[in-house]
Image (cartoon, helix red, strand yellow):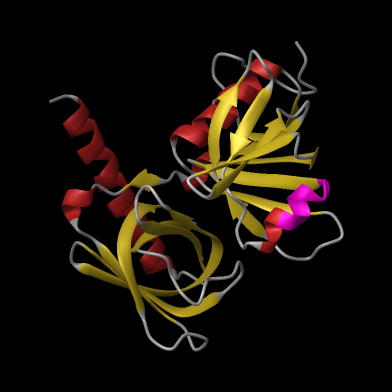
Amino acid sequence: MDNKTNDKVGDPLGVIGVQTISNQQQIFSILSSVQKARAPITIKFENNDRYYTSLILRTDLDDNYMIIDEIAPQDGHQLAMEKRPFSIRGSHKGVSLFFRPNEIAGSGIESDIAFYKIPLPKEMIYQQRRHAYRAIVARALQINATLSGSHRYGPLTGRLFDLSLSGCRINFEGEIKPALVRSDKFESCKILLNDFALNTPVTLKHATYIRDWGETTCGFQFEGLDGTSQKLIDRFVYFLQREARRLETK
C-alpha cells in the first residue's frame, strides 16, 4: 500500500480524517468523483493572493493526466500560460481534497474556450467529514434561496441544489454580474424548508459559471446557526435522504 495512513482503493470516500494519499488508483477515483459531480475546484497560484475557479473535464489514469476547464477570472489564463505553479482545492459530498504543486502541461481552445492539461498529482491531502452529510435537493421540490448583502445592489434568488448542517449549494440562472468573489459575506440567506423559514448569514466558498447548464453554481457556509435552526436543517436533510431512497427503490 502506498498511503501514509489507511488506504482503501475500492472505497475512495470511505474513510474519516486527514490522509496523505499516494495511491494513483485512489487519487484517480476521487478526482473522477469530483469530475462527474461537476463540483468546482479552487486554484491558487504561488505568490498570488487571488483565488480562481475551474472544473475538471476529464481524468485519464492510463496516461496520468486530467483536463480542467477555463480558469476564472480571466487573468488566471495568463498566469497558467506563464507556467506558474498552483494548488488545487476541492470538495464533494463532505470530502475535501488539496494537492500541489501543479503546472500546466498543455492547453488548447475549443469554441473559443480555453482548457488545460495537468498531470495527475503524485500525492493528495484528503479529508472526509461525515458529520456534514450533504443531501441533494430534487428540482421537483422547487426550493428557492434568496441572498441579500450590503455589498450587492439587490437580492439574488436561486435554486437550492444541496444542503448540509455546514452549508448549502445554490444555482443561479445565467452568469452573475458583478462576479461573486470567494469569502463574500451575505447578511441574509432565506430558504423555506417545508414549513420552516431559515434565515442566516452565509459566506461564499466558491462560485463557478457552468456554460452547459447556463447557471452559476455557488457553495456557501452557514454562519452562526442557532440550535433550533440546526435541528430543523438536520430534520430536513433526513427528509431528503428518505426521499432519495424512496425514488431509488421505485
> In the image, residue 231 lies at what x, y percent?
36, 59
* Residue at 67 percent of width and 39 percent of height: 107
In this view of the protein, which residue sits in the foreground, 161 or 79? 79
Range shown magenta: 78-85
Q: Is residue 229 left or right of residue 137?
A: right
Screen quadrant of the N terminus: top right
Quarter assignment of residue 204: bottom right
In this view of the protein, which residue sits in the foreground, 242 or 99? 99
> In the image, residue 50 lies at what x, y percent?
73, 65
In this view of the protein, which residue sits in the foreground, 74 or 36? 74
Q: Is residue 21 left or right of residue 213?
A: right
Q: Is residue 45 left or right of residue 199?
A: right
Screen quadrant of the C terminus: top left
Q: How many marks?
A: 0
In the image, is residue 249 above or below residue 124?
Answer: above
In this view of the protein, which residue sits in the foreground, 222 or 159? 159
| Residue sitting at the far right | 47
* Residue at 69 percent of width and 51 percent of height: 43
> In the image, residue 78 lies at what x, y percent?
74, 56
* Residue at 48 percent of width and 40 percent of height: 93
In the image, is residue 106 above or below residue 145?
Answer: above
Instruction: Using the rendered image of the protein, determine whether residue 18 is visible from the camera's viewpoint.
Output: no
In the image, is residue 198 above or below residue 25?
Answer: below
Instruction: Using the rendered image of the protein, determine whether residue 134 is visible from the camera's viewpoint.
Output: yes
Q: Is residue 95 left or right of residue 158?
A: right
| Residue sitting at the far left | 250
> In the image, residue 109 lies at what x, y percent?
58, 43
Q: Is residue 3 magenta?
A: no
